[in-house]
Amino acid sequence: MSDPVEPPPTGHMRVLITGAAGFLGSHLCDRFMADGHEVVAVDNFITGSPDNLAHLFGRPGFHFIEQDVTNYLYVEGRVDGVLHFASPASPVDYLEMPIPTLKVGSLGTHKTLGLAKAKNARYLLASTSEVYGDPKVHPQPESYWGSVNPVGPRGVYDEAKRFAEAMTMAYHRYHGVDTRIARIFNTYGPRMRPGDGRVISNFIVQALRGDPLSVYGDGSQTRSFCYVADEVEGLYRLFHSAWTDTPMNIGNPREFTVLELAELVRALTGSRSEIRHHPLPTDDPAVRQPDIGLARRELGWEPAVGLEEGLKKTIPYFRAVLEQETGARARVLADG
Ligand code: NAD
Ligand code: UDP
């Protein structure tokens, strides 16, 4: 088989990454910096933290702009790539911030596409498996149009991303912008916020604290979890590929029930936490699993890290964060 991946554009690129202080955005900054590119990172810190970029501040080739990307975005100089990752991503976050979520998916996508058009830059949209909603086709190929409740509580995220995809394709078709759309499936790893409410961060933190693991519903719903290093590699390859025709699923196709995940986290942390069931959130998808045939074919990519291995890399990060928090609390108490 001939190599279908276009070689990375020759030489040095200057890319702008929105949502750069978040979980995925900060790992993407690392990936571009590691290859010697220049990064202009943009974030307003509504769910991200400067801590995620602390190691990059002051490094040659790294620039930071604190800004809400729903407002006009002025960037001086050349921009070769725009990667739009700004958006609350945890259901807890987007349910607490429905309007900022709708705005960053709509206005933020419009502004960043406008920037890409003005700078003649390549554009990558961070879309999501949530565009498939509660899927009636399983696993989900990119050709599936999805089953989303537009007026349910999750609709603020799902519809914002569906609008973002439509806007991206419109800029591609009508303005000739060189676009890519990644449909990202549940990704986990270091730099997730301990309190961000997603299932892996919740379970690990609960297990380490000895608190009950909060399983929503009976735990038979499924998700397919991708370790962050695999996800970022897939995104990086998609950005450099020639694939513009359709969105592309980037995720790990190995599917687990939430209950299986809870048991695995308990075993790997050595925790004796009990499992406690809570009501299932409205419109929580019953199943989710990516069909990654397209990514395999076009990018020569597939995830290499299984869930057990990925959790073993992630648990020490959460342990360290919790120890820091406990230390900080103890110092406050000691100071009186
Ligand atoms: P995250 O919450 O850690 O990061 C999002 C970042 O965007 C934060 O730093 C936040 O402060 C920033 N942001 C939000 N609104 C902004 C605005 N208006 N202006 C500037 N910055 C803003 O989330 P994440 O998990 O890193 O997700 C990143 C992207 O990937 C999101 O677009 C999300 O929808 C998408 N995604 C993530 C996953 C996943 O499993 N992590 C799955 C599907 C899609
Ligand atoms: N979930 C759970 N306990 C938690 C958090 C989430 O059982 O403490 C479930 C949630 O109902 C969903 C799955 O885990 O079925 C994944 O949730 P997450 O918030 O990580 O992301 P989603 O895939 O729903 O966007």
Image (cartoon, helix red, strand yellow):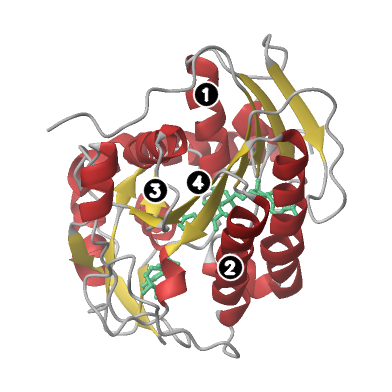
Residue 312: x %, y % from top left: 26, 38
| C-alpha separation, residue under disc 2 versus residue under disc 1 | 27 Å
Q: Can you tell which mark lies on residue 188?
A: 3
Q: Earlier in the sequence, mark 2 or mark 4?
A: 2
Q: Amino acid at mark 3?
A: Tyr
The answer to the question of whether label 2 and label 1 lie on touching residues, with beta carbons closer than 8 A, is no
Q: Amino acid at mark 2?
A: Ala
Q: Foreground mark, 2 or 4?
A: 2
Crowding around mark 4 (Cα neighbors within 10 Å: few <14, some 14 to 19, many 20+) is many
Q: Foreground mark, 2 or 1?
A: 2
| C-alpha separation, residue under disc 4 versus residue under disc 3 | 7 Å
Whether the residue under disc 4 has CB within 8 Å of ligand 1: yes
Residue labelled with disc 2: 166
Report the residue that reaches farthest toward the left. Answer: 1
Residue 100: x %, y % from top left: 75, 66
Residue 130: x %, y % from top left: 45, 70
Whether the residue under disc 3 has CB within 8 Å of ligand 1: yes
The answer to the question of whether label 2 and label 4 lie on touching residues, with beta carbons closer than 8 A, is no
Residue labelled with disc 1: 32
From the viewer's side, name the closer residue of 318 and 86. 86
The answer to the question of whether label 2 and label 3 lie on touching residues, with beta carbons closer than 8 A, is no
The answer to the question of whether label 4 and label 3 lie on touching residues, with beta carbons closer than 8 A, is yes
Whether the residue under disc 2 has CB within 8 Å of ligand 1: no
